[in-house]
Image (cartoon, rainbow, N blue to C red):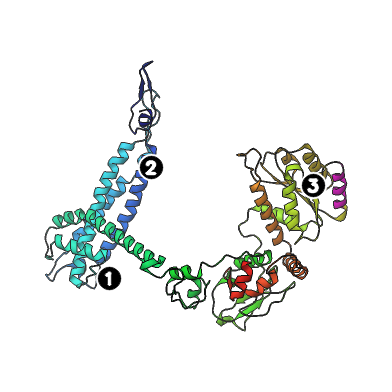
Amino acid sequence: MLAIEINAAAENPFISAEDMTAYHHGGFYQAQLVLALDHFRLALTQVARLSTSRLSSLNEPAFTRLKPFLADNEAASSGVMILEYSAAAALGDLRAFSAPASLGHAVLSRGVEEQASFASLAARQTLRACRAYRLVVGCELVAAVRALRQRGLRPDPELPVGRALELAESVLDDETADRPLTDDVTAAAGLLDRFTEIWRGARHERGQEWGRQCGQQRGGERGPGRGQECGCDRQPGRTAAGALRGAPAHADPAAHRAQHGAPRRRRAVPLQRRTRRTRRRQPALRDPLRGRPRLRRLPGAAQTPPRGGPLRVGPGHGVVQRVPAGRRGRDREPQAPRRDTGRPRPVAKAGRLLAASRPLPVLGLRAAASQAYGFAYFAAKVHPDVRLLNEGGTMIHDRIDAAVRAGATALLCFALPRHPREVVDTLAYAREAGLTVVTVADSAFAPVAKVSDLLIPAAVGTGLAFDTACAPMLLGRVLLEAMCDDLPDAQARLEEFDARAAARGVVRGVTPVDATRRFVEWDGRFQSVSSQTRLTFAH
C-alpha cells in the first residue's frame, strides 16, 4: 500500500493511523508530463506545416499537371481551394496551442505552494492541438485522393499506401463539382486511426516475413545449414563493403557465415595504427577516387603497399594516395597532416612539451609507479631518451639534476591518491630546477596542483577496496599519442623497432613487417589477400 500511495500520480497523502499525520509525497507535481506534452505539440506543429505545404503543391498545376485547385471542367470552378484556407486556419490554431505550458508559474497560499506544473493546461492544449492537426491532415487527404483520381494513378494494392487509398476512396465522395467539403474533411480526419491500423498491420507482416527469412537462413530443414554450400561467388572473409567497390556479392550472407564462419578480427600493430590514423586525418587519402594509387610523401606516415606491391620499410617513405583522373600530371606539394584533430588543448599542449624534452623524465612513485612504467615503456619506442623515475628518496633529486644537465625541459608525473609527500617535494624540486611539470592526477584540486605547471585530471574509481586507475592509464596513452604527433621521427622509429624485433624474433607468429606485407589497408581496414595469411595470423 505504501508503494502504491507514494507512486500515485495524484495528490493523495498517506495518513498514519497511529499519530493521525498526513505525509505528502509530491506526486501532484507532473513536470515531466508537461515537458513531454510540450515537446509533442511542437513536433506536431512541424508535421502540420509540411502537410499544408504539400496541400499548396497539390493546388499548383506545375506539380500535378491538372487544373488549378484540382477543379473540374466547369468555368470558374474553385475545386479544393477552400481546403487550403481551412488548413491554414487550423495551423494557426495549432501554433497557438503549441505554446509551452511549462513556462507558467504561480505562487499560491502565501508561499505554501510556490510552484505549479500546469499539467492540466498542457493536457487540454494537447487535445485541442490534436483536433487541429486532424483537420490539417484531413484537408490534405481529400485533395490527394482527388488528385490521384483525376490522374488515374493507383499504387500497388499490396502496399500499405495502396490499402489506405482503397479505404479513402470507399469513404470519400468522387464528385468533383463545387460543393461544401465539410463532410469530406470530417470523414477523412476520421480515417487517421484506421490508417494507423494499416501501418501497424504492415509492420507486423514485415516482421513475420523477416522472421521466416531468418529462420530459413539459419539452416535445418528450412534452408542451408552449416556444412552446406551457400552458393556464394566470393572469397571467404570478404566484407559487404567490398561489393560497393566492385567485388562480387554474396548470394546468401547468412548461409555464407554458417559455412565459412565470420571473418576474424586482426590486431593491428602500432606501425599499422599510426599509418591508419595518418590516413584518417587526410580526407584525400580515403576518398574512393578512380585512378591508380600514387605515392605521396607525408611526414609521420609509413608506406602501405598497393595491391600486391612491394614493401619498403624505413624512414621517409610515403603513403598510397588516390589522385583524381583530372589532376594527373598536375602534382602539387602535399600538405602536412594536421596535428590537432579535435584533441583537448591541454592534451595537445602537453604532447608538445613532452615531445620537445630531451631527455624526458617520467615520474611515478608508489601507487602511480605502474602508470609511469607503462608510459615510459611505450614512449621509449618513439622518443630518443626516456628516463623512468620510480624510486623515492634523495637519489631522485640527483636523477632530476642529471636530466636537467642533459637538456631536459619538461617532466611528466603520474600522481594518484593518497599523494605521498615525497611526490609533492619532488615536483617542487623539479620546478626549481627549471623543468615544466606536466601532471596526471585524480583531481584538479589534488595536492600536486600547486607544484604543477599543467595538470590534467583523470578520476580514479573508488568502488572497490583499492582505487582503480583506468582513466589515468587511458589518459597516459592519449598523451603518448599526442607526443607522437609532435615527434617528426616517431613513425621512422616505430618502423626501425619493428624491423629489429622481426630480425631478432622477439614476437612469435606474424611479424609487423609480414603483416603489413600480407594485408592491404583500404579505408582504414586491413583485408586478407590470402588464406595462408589468415591461418598464420590466427595463430
Q: How far apart are the alpha carbons under marks 1 and 2?
A: 39 Å
Query: What residue is disc 2 on?
Result: 35
In space, the residues marked 3 and 1 are separated at their CA atoms by 77 Å
Residue 308 figure quarter: bottom right
Residue on which disc 3 sits: 390
In front: 33, or 273?
273
Q: Start and end of the magenta stretch?
A: 393-404
The structure residue drawn at horizontal position 67% and vertical position 65%, both measured from the top left corner, is: 269
Q: Report whether residue 165 is seen.
A: yes
Q: Is residue 89 visible?
A: no
Residue furthest to the bottom in view is: 329
Residue 76 quadrant: bottom left
Residue 399 part of the magenta segment: yes
The quarter in which the C terminus is drawn is bottom right
Q: Is residue 125 left or right of residue 385?
A: left
| Res 217 label | none
Disc 2 secondary structure class? helix
Compared with residue 51, is residue 537 higher up or lower down, i.e. above or below? below
Residue 363, position in %: x, y?
Answer: 77, 48
Earlier in the chain: of badge 3 and badge 2, it is 2
